[in-house]
Image (cartoon, grey):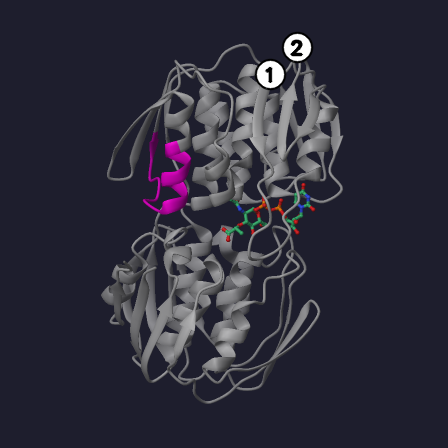
Amino acid sequence: MSSYIIEGGKRLEGEAVVSGSKNASLPILASTILNKGTTKLYNVPEISDTKITEDILKILGCKVKKNNGKVEINSKNIVKKEIPEELMHQMRSTVVMAGAILGRFNEVRFSYPGGCDIGARPIDLHLKSFEKLGINITENAGFIICKCDKIIGANIDLDFPSVGATENIILASVYAEGITSITNAAMEPEIVDLANCLNKMGAKIEGAGTSNIKITGVKKLKDISYNIMPDRIEAGTLLCMVAATGGKVSLKNINSDIISPVLTKLEETGCKIDIRRNEINLEAPKRLKSTDIKTMPYPGFPTDMQSVFSSMLTTSKGTSVIIENIFENRYKYMSELKKMGAKITIEGKTAVIKGTKRLIAAKVNSTDLRGGAALVTAALVAKGKTEITNVEYILRGYEDLDKKLRYLGANITLKEGE
Ligand code: EPZ
């Protein structure tokens, strides 16, 4: 496994360009299964999660051509309707491919995606929604088989505004007979991006970005090209990493309205934020003030920003209270932060962070994607050499993170594992 070696204690300053969104790319890559032709996608980040998704598309029978950020997918000759088990377990978010395969072929076979490092990650809302659409679901030896003669539009009320379940309902309903309406739908910007891409292909999706989405079934989609939205979590991550070092950054290719809850919280810590068209400029104080965060579905504070933001707060003045409402096990990285001198106590969903003047460089281990980014944030602050192992987690969701940080003046190198 590979590691980052970070010589911390330097103030970061400069510019960074935000890459395409991982969490928009994955469902949009899946959506190309619905078009029986060629779809060209631009600004797809080169990360291992998009690579796995592209590999699955190839295994299904798609032709996938790539060159720097552009991915061209020809889905005319899909021969398989099964998501490979080992890739399903490697990346649970491949579950949205089930909705796309179902939408096109009225059948799909896949294995339970299984939990991961941040929680059990059940898919009960996905399966209940498929059943509402007239799909028969059988389970056998860990595999789920979904089948129907045709998908019939239905009214679906989600118990929880699940991002993946909302995406899966949309993908499965594009060719449905009649109208599907989702109430209590997730409102994340990545769902709007998916709907915009599908509508450009000729789908009929209204209300994406609100909690009520309506999908009117269509007969055919057409070849298009589409530009993936920027990654709001990468943007927030870079802002927090710079702020943690008391630095200054001009972030390009990001529209501030999709990240406003994070910007509001950064201002509460004493950061000066200046918004330009497609650009965010941040200047941090020498030492941040503490603040409290509570993760919520969009448009609340994003759970994916909890780890990095909390890590940034470990050296702030005062005490911060963190409440993680979305995933039940998203504090694992904090035990690694404590090895670096962070003062954190955890009680259920709540973590209390007592700001300390300094962190100590140490050897720490990534436990998940955003937890790994939290360790990078701490390592940039801690004087001395920190080694972060298992950075494969981080490479899943951040394109060229070490390169972008070096460009901002960080001393970070990637030590390839055997
Ligand atoms: C998406 O995951 C994102 N992943 C996650 O980002 C993000 O944290 C999450 O949405 C919430 O915003 C992608 O888009 C690829 P959910 P998803 O379904 O769809 C429970 C990252 O770091 N739930 O909204 O899996 C679930 O257990 C990743 O980039 C059910 O109970 O999230 C969780 O507690 C991590 N039953 C909560 O809902 C279900 O059927 C939110 O899950 C589905 C979900």
Numbered circle sitting on residue 149? 2
* Relative to 108, residue 282 above or below: below
Closer-to-camera residue (164/271):
164
Q: Which residue is mark 1?
A: 106
Placement of the C terminus among the 4 image quadrants: bottom left
x and y percentages locating residue 52 in the rendered image: 40, 39
x and y percentages locating residue 35 in the rendered image: 45, 18
Q: Are marks 1 and 2 in contact (CB under 8 Å)?
A: yes
Residue at 37% from the left image edge and 26% from the top image edge: 58
Residue at 56% from the left image edge and 60% from the top image edge: 261
* Relative to 110, residue 15 above or below: below
Q: Specify the quadrant of the image occupied by residue 214.
A: top right
Rate crowding at label 1 as few (under 14), some (14 to 19) or many (20 or more) other CA atoms within 10 Å.
many
* Relative to 97, residue 252 above or below: below
Rate crowding at label 2 as few (under 14), some (14 to 19) or many (20 or more) other CA atoms within 10 Å.
few
Q: Please state the extent of the stretch shown in magenta in the rendering.
A: 41-55
Identify residue type, mark 1: Asn
